[in-house]
Amino acid sequence: MKVLVVGGGGREHAVVKKLKTNPEISEIFVLPGNGGIARDATCVPIAAKDIASIVSFAEANAVDYAVVTPDDPLVLGCVDALEEIGVPCFGPRAAAAHIEGSKVFAKALMKKYGIPTASYESFDDMDKALAYLDAAPVPTVVKADGLALGKGVIIARTREEAKQAVTEMMRDHKFGRSGEQIVIEEFLEGPEVSVLAFTDGKTLVPMVSSMDHKRAGDRDTGLNTGGMGTVAPNPYYTEAVAQRCMEEIFLPTVKAMNAEGRPFKGCLYFGLMLTKDGPKVIEYNCRFGDPETQVVLPLLESDLFTVMRAVTEERLADVEVKFAGRSACCVILASKGYPEHYEKGFPLEIPEAIADQVFVAGAARKDGALVTNGGRVVGCTAVADTLPQAVEGAYRLASQVRFDNSYCRSDIGQRALLALGEA
């Protein structure tokens, strides 16, 4: 079978490496892919948002199945367009992807169906938003309604910071049209947990939980990024918490989307906060998280392609989805200056002996060699019997990858180890 994967980052590299293990798959195309993914699949320079060209390529190359992973093409209807030409897909249609495409929609959905989340107000008028902030409690959270590369959420510690965030989003268009509407919501406190889940619109199977590290600097300082590292499983996500999330959040969300005429099929991501009042939803994503995927999929023992097709064909209940009872840690090596300004084009050296444990996010090929081509360059993932071993292993891998102007956080996994009493 010929499989097409839409996207070009570390998440897609993790998906490709897992798909490669299925003997039924004869060829994997990745659009656009990157220089590192080219080691494992055929990369084609078609942008992930160029839906028309993706469809034309799928037709011309007799693609049998497609996996659409990034948020933009999902929200733009890439799955809809591919299914219209008869290509079965893993990923939600545009109507369902709206759960990530609009935070205003997502918050209204949770309010309507009683799914626990932070209290909030939404605005499409800047003056009204600023007036609301005059009396709103701080800290508070300001969110751009639409997609913003994971950077459209501002935790404002003061009223002035909140008003600045609103002004930058709504007047200065910092995130383009994504900031035309905003959500201002209650600041929640507690451990954060990421849970990805396979769902075919009827059955939902959570994957192993994970803990992301969003901030650029150690001890969670600096700007928000797309993610500087992850560990799995998340020690705060106990069996009791998991059961409560299934009953109060996961299944009610699937049912709510069905009730709204937006059945969700694919990977549904739950960003959760474990508050003193119980678990609450911080955000939904309509796809695999990045870099959560880089620790979750290496722990998946079941065949990913088999699970994906079961989701597409709405028979997930008939397929075993099994994860190893082990731990994983991913350390991101980024270009110095990320998530703001950074240089590209430095030679990137990944020893062949560790290549299978390195997921390439931002690299290109120049004269046959890899060079850096992004903010987050690679994710180094180690799987081990214990979390301390996985953390140590990930940093050992990261020390072997070389490129100029590289940096990484030195404390990935420390909060998790502290929760386990092993820091």
Image (cartoon, helix red, strand yellow):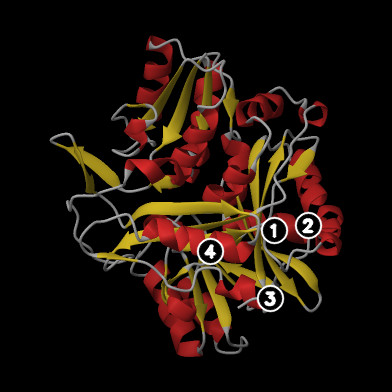
Q: CA distance from mark 1 to mark 4?
A: 39 Å
Report the residue at 41% width, 80% height from top. 164
Vertical arrangement, residue 267 with respect to residue 114, above or below: above
Contact (CB < 8 A) between labels 2 and 1? Answer: yes
Q: Which mark is residue 108?
A: 1
Q: x and y percent of residue 80 in the render?
A: 55, 27
Earlier-in-chain disc, 1 versus 4: 1
For the residues labelled 2 and 1, the Cα–Cα distance comes to: 6 Å
Question: Label 1 is placed on what type of residue?
Answer: Ala
Name which residue type carries label 3: Ala
Residue 29, how many percent across, how many down? Answer: 40, 24
Report, in whole angstroms, how far the alpha carbon at label 3 lies from the one at label 1: 34 Å
Q: Is residue 169 left or right of residue 291?
A: left
Q: Is residue 205 left or right of residue 301?
A: right
Do the residues under discs 2 and 4 have CB atoms within 8 angstroms?
Answer: no
Which residue corresponds to mark 3?
419
Mark 2: give few (<14), some (14-19) or many (20+) Cα within 10 Å: few
Q: Quadrant of residue 84?
A: top right
Q: Is residue 118 visible?
A: yes
Say whether residue 70 is left or right of residue 173: right
Residue at (38% x, 36% y) in the render: 48
> SS of the residue at dot 3?
helix
Q: Which mark is residue 260?
A: none
Q: Which quadrant does the C terminus fall into?
A: bottom right
Tell me the element at label 4. helix
